[in-house]
Structures are given as structure tokens and as C-alpha cells.
Image (cartoon, rainbow, N blue to C red):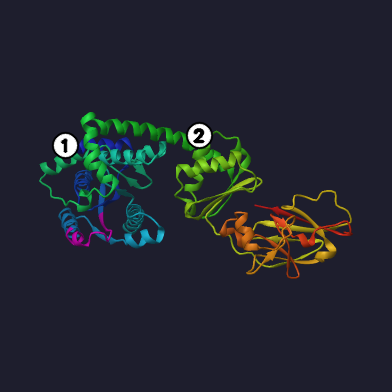
Amino acid sequence: MSSPEIINKVTATIRKYSMLSGQEKILVGLSGGPDSVCLLNILYNLKNTFLLELNAVYIDHGLRPEETTKEIEFCKKLCESFRIPFTQKAIDVKSFAREEGLSKQDAARELRYRVFNETAYEAKAHKIALGHTADDQIETFFMRFFRGSGPKGLSGIPPVRGNIIRPFIEIERKEIEEFLKQQNLNYIIDSSNLKKDYLRNRLRLSFIPEIKKINPLIALTASRTMDILREEEKYFDIIVTKTLMKLITRKTDFRIELFLSPMEAMDKVILRRVLRRAIDETKGLRGMEFIHIESIIDLIKHGKQGNRLNLPKGLRVIKNYSTLMITSESPSRMGTFTLNVPGEVFIKERGAVITASSEDKVDNYGNGKTTAVFDLDKTGSVLTVRARANGDFFYPMGFGKKKKLQDYFVDEKIPRDERDSVPIVISGNNIVWIAGYRGDERFKISDDTKLFLKMELKISL
């Protein structure tokens, strides 16, 4: 492909996806590799066509110190030759990956995009141009395919996402290499791209070349397929947005609550997408995989009130009476409250209310969990509600033998991070009721009971 041909093809891609509107400042991600060097050159050739002002940024990931100095110097001289302002930035990928529990590749990607946006803001650039190619699209498609991604993942790298544009998204790497050769342009090869330690490199160096033997036009074929998937995703996005707006009842950075009943009747095709969108828009919940979404759907459609899921990275999903709560927040340890009879206490940390009443006669003794009845003369009319304490024990109703509270929690499979938010009702120094679970044998009613203490636990979440 001659130089005018690739420039015309890039121009067509820019117009096809409305990447540029003219008279804009563009920040180019420049690594010194063939893709970014070619991108800078072609955008420079298109300066007058689109009335562009160019800036460039090099990001040092701190992973190849022996190569970085050479790359920075190369990029700096290249920009000087074009009279383009050049900036270099550094990120600490290893530390960030360790702190966030990410792979180096994922950590590098997240930090890199942060720096692109920060630098664009500092330079007052309207757009960020990156050198992703049609070959990157194929590699991304198969990477996500092997990992079991759905249609959204298989739709590949978007040509435009916010202020990020990818003018080479329909250009193959061989076209870029040919242009650089014709123009006698130098570039630097990142040594990490030649290693087969990473899945993308194994696909690039071994798998994709074999695929191209079967279908030399795989880049075009994959591009068309991904275009179709992106168009369908846009359609579904509209439906999901409208649906989610009606479902959200409460939302923070680390917790989201959704109305339950509409989801119980919702088709899985939409429900999967609604849950994925809800989770992705709540930063503390990101990272759920397909199997986790399926588990949540099963909880919604078949779980009982109070059932919950404990997922990786500290994520919890709880099915309440009318809502589904997805959270990465660790429950706070509840405070200590005085519960007078009659009276009630609101436990903010639990999102619950415990009510206590004195009755001469009781028709409904409850299930002992959310409703429990005791002998008021044994408990007294001034009780305490608190979290568990070291050394707590009780005599489980119907069991009679002394049991450590810690052992009871383990037997009941109460998640460790929720044990400090279970309300314990105390009379003097003795446990009367583990609210939501079980009462104490010592305070049970008998034929001699004259006054009944009735307590109810109501979850307000």
C-alpha cells in the first residue's frame, strides 16, 4: 500500500466513526514503536485536512529501565523534528498491581489511561489518539473469546470511546510497516512484545499467523463481526439504561441496591446485562466474571429472603425482602443500645429495627428467628442490644447445652465479616436472643409464664 493509500484509508476511518470534527488539539500516545510512530506521522500529514494541533506523551511503565532512556530520547527527537510538544510521564505499575491485586498488564492499562486523561487535561487537548490496529482487534477478540466473554467483550476495542480515538483500528500492521519502510522512518521495538510470556504475544506470534493461512482476510472478517456486535450492543444499551433507571433504589461507590420483584420476572438476556451495567458503574464492585453474574441470577430467581453470596474480592450479594444488595463494604461493628420494654431500637449498621412488647397473651410465637417470645419476668424490662463480645456463650433454645457464640456462628455458616453486625439481646450479662437466629433456653416461656416478652427483627434495607 502506497503512502497516499494508507493516508486515505485512515482519513476514511476517521470520517466513518466521526473521530474528528476539525480545529482540535490531539494528544498522541507515543511509545516509539511502529504503530505510534506511524500514527504521529500520518496525523501530522492530516494536520491541514482536519486543522489539527498535535501534542505527544510517552509513558514510562517502570518495567524496562534498560530500554526506557533510549525510547524517551527517540520520541523526544521525533517530536522535535515535527515541532510537536512532547511530554514524558512515569507510572509505578508493580506497586499499583500489588496494592490492587491486579496483573501487571491490567495495572499498566488502568494507570496508562489515567495518565492519558491527566495529560490531555493539562495540555487542553480535545482528543487522545492511540495506535491500536486491526491486528490488535483480532488479538483482543481471541483473548476475550478464550476467556469466555459475551457479546460486549467480543465487540472488541471501540474505535471511539469518550475522548479516545483510534484512527488505525481498520489498518493492518503490515500496512503500517510498509508505510514506515517507504518513508524510511525509524522506530523502536519493545522487547517485551517478542516474549511469549503473555497471552496477547502468543496469539500475535503463533496463533494469528496460522489463522491468516486459513483466512488471509481475517482482519476484515473480524472487523465486520465486531462492528455488528457493537451495533447490537448499542441497541441493548438503550434498553438496559431504561431498565436500570427503574431498578436502582440506592447507590454509593461501593454498594448498589436494586428493586427485586422486576428482576425476578426478567428474561436472563436482559438481566445479565442489567446486572453487569449496575456492577460496572459502581467502582468498588468491578471485576465480576460471567459465573458470578449467573450465581446472582440464581439467587434472584430461586433464593430465599436473607440468602446471600460471598464472591471473590470481598463482594457480597444479599437478597432482602424487596431489594437485592451488592456490596464490597465490610459491615461496621454495631454499637450498644438500651432496649426498654415496650420500645424499639434502630441499628444503623445492620439496617434493622428490633421492637419489644409486653403481652399478657401470645397467639403467635414466631419462628424464633425474626420473631421470638420469652418470659418477661426472667428477662426483665430493660435489655441491652450489642455486638458479640469475647467469651460470649448461650444455651441454644431446644438444645439446652452451653455453647460458645463463636462456635454457633461457625455452625450456622455466618460469614466472618458479618458476625460483628449480628444483634445480640442481653439481660444482665446473659444472652436472651441472637436476633435473626435463635433464643436462649434459660429465658423460654413455660406454663408458669405470666408476662410474655415478644421481640421482632425487621430488616429495613
- The residue range painted magenta reads 56-70
Q: Nearer the viewer, residue 456 or 452?
A: 452
Q: CA distance from mark 2 to mark 1?
A: 46 Å
Work out which residue is located at the far front of the displayed protein and give it: 401
Quarter-wise, where is residue 333 in the image?
Answer: bottom right
In the image, what residue type sits under mark 2?
A: Val
Q: Helix, strand, or loop for circle 1? A: helix
Q: Helix, strand, or loop for circle 2? A: helix
- Residue 224, given in percent of the width and then of the height, sits at 32, 31
In the image, what residue type sits under mark 1?
A: Pro
Numbered label tally = 2
Taking the magenta stretch, the answer to whether it contains residue 65 is yes
Mark 1: give few (<14), some (14-19) or many (20+) Cα within 10 Å.
few
Mark 2: give few (<14), some (14-19) or many (20+) Cα within 10 Å.
few
Vertical placement of residue 355 versus 165, above or below = below
Of callouts 2 and 1, the N-terminal one: 1
- Residue 435, given in percent of the width and then of the height, sits at 70, 57
- Residue 171, given in percent of the width and then of the height, sits at 24, 38
Q: Nearer the viewer, residue 410 or 89?
A: 410
Give the labeled residue for mark 1: 4
Q: Is residue 359 left or right of residue 21?
A: right
Q: Is residue 166 left or right of residue 151?
A: left
Quarter-wise, where is residue 150 in the image?
Answer: top left
* Image quadrant where one finds the N terminus: top left
Q: Nearer the viewer, residue 456 or 223?
A: 456
Q: Residue at x 73, y 70 (%)?
A: 429
As drawn, the label of residue 269 is 2
Taking the magenta stretch, the answer to whether it contains residue 458 is no
